[in-house]
Image (cartoon, helix red, strand yellow):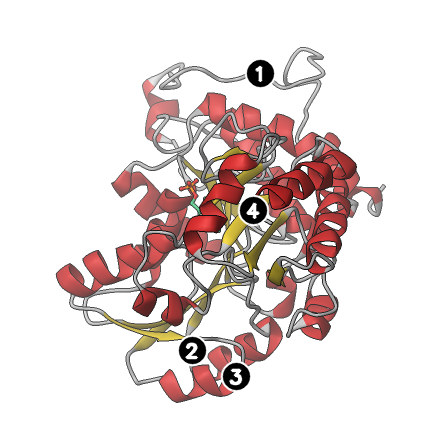
Amino acid sequence: MAQIEQDSRFIATHLGDDYEKYLGAVVPPVFMNSLHVFPNTQAYLNFDITDPEQYTYGRVANPTVRIVEQKIAALEKGAMALCFASGMAAATTAVLSVCKAGSHVICVKNIYGPMKNFLEQYCVQTLNMSVTFVKGDCIEDFEAAITDHTHMIILESPTSLVFTLQDLAAIAKLAKKHHITTYIDNTYCTPLYQNPLELGIDLVMHTTSKYLGGHSDLIGGVLVSNDHEFMQKKVSVMREFLGGISGPAEAWLVMRGIRSLEVRLPVHQQTALQVANFLEGHPLVERVYYPGLKSHPQYELAQRQQKGSCGLLSFELKTDPDTTRKFVDSLKLFKIGVSWGGFESLVSLPCYNSSEQTCSWLGCSRGIVRIHCGLEGAENLIEDLRQALEQIK
Ligand SMILES: *Cc1c(COP(=O)(O)O)cnc(C)c1O
């Protein structure tokens, strides 16, 4: 039994489903209550916030949320997970749990946009922190940026527009030497395709709004770590201060999404690889950004570090941004939208309104197209792309 309990398929389908506790319900219920009452004052006075079996108030903990936290901690091979109302609630809580006024952080420059804005517009301006942005594809980038005040290294691998990777084991080793906390946004790979804690990273974040939820019907986030004490004393306390815990209904939806992650993700991957190969072979396509392609500049690292790639990729056409826009408007199956990780295929032009300066900093062109390959079938998606490319020939 010990072995099956570590099998991601068992964790996703059954871990934490305590039939005895929940009247034999095959699916644990949503605990839609804001508080738990005590039988007497002694029990109330004895309440132990560190005991995962005890509950008092919904901003502190909730049984449905805790089941999901158990599942995600086990999938990420971590000791403890905490769920949040959004990926950004998880990310900002992580920074505020690790850093203080005056802290210096090193962050990959292709980090998720709102996270970059949080660092620049809040941490720097209000907390007097400083940030060094690095490309992140070589260890020297990080080595050179470390100062006596560096408290955190913020990673996202691969990044979700140009899909640059960081060597997680090497960075973790360097950071440990300098007592710096390492953090990664692991949303792209999900716990099935990358386990950064095993490579020495301290803190893992996922937006459950993407693949973990998987059905574009919720917003949520999670932090996972092997350091139980840090999670208990810092992250959990900060979650209580900021009030960013996941709602129970969203947690329940995440739990449902996780059950089928193991069958959904390989389909997203397969589809994306077929689509990426089609695009790469098309005469109107300039460049495809996808870590699963042999042409990816860090393909070897992706093979070593990740168990797979998902359904999100970008590409550039051999034309100007306005013709690219016409191509996007000609797509029928791909819907125009910003998110990803759900059942549906999506397309966006993330840099269309950006300056040339911003684009060159990001390492792409204004016309870069990002697509999420959903579950509509590779041949159907390829046909849609083919007909839209015909329109701009
Ligand atoms: C969507 C996203 C986030 C933010 O998650 P929310 O749940 O929307 O707050 C963070 N990182 C990445 C890579 C994302 O795609």
Query: The disc labelled 4 sits on which kind of residue?
Result: Ile
206 or 236, nearer to the observer: 206
Q: Please report whichever mark, 4 or 1, sits nearer to the chain's N-terminal start.
A: 1
* Label number found at residue 139: 3
Real-space CA distance between mark 2 and mark 1, rounded to the nearest whole angstrom: 42 Å
Q: Which residue is mark 1?
A: 29
Residue at 44% over, 63% down:
365
Q: Position of residue 386 (x, y in %)?
A: 69, 43
Query: The disc labelled 1 sits on which kind of residue?
Result: Pro
Pointers 4 and 2 in contact (C-beta within 8 Å): no
Q: Please report whichever mark, 2 or 1, sits nearer to the chain's N-terminal start.
A: 1
Q: Please report whichever mark, 3 or 2, sits nearer to the chain's N-terminal start.
A: 3
Q: Position of residue 104 (x, y in %)?
A: 28, 74
Query: The disc labelled 3 sits on which kind of residue?
Result: Ile
325 or 393, nearer to the observer: 393
Q: Residues within 10 Å of mark 1 (few under 14, many from 20)?
A: some
Relative to residue 122, is residue 36 drawn left or right?
right
Q: Position of residue 293 (x, y in %)?
A: 72, 63
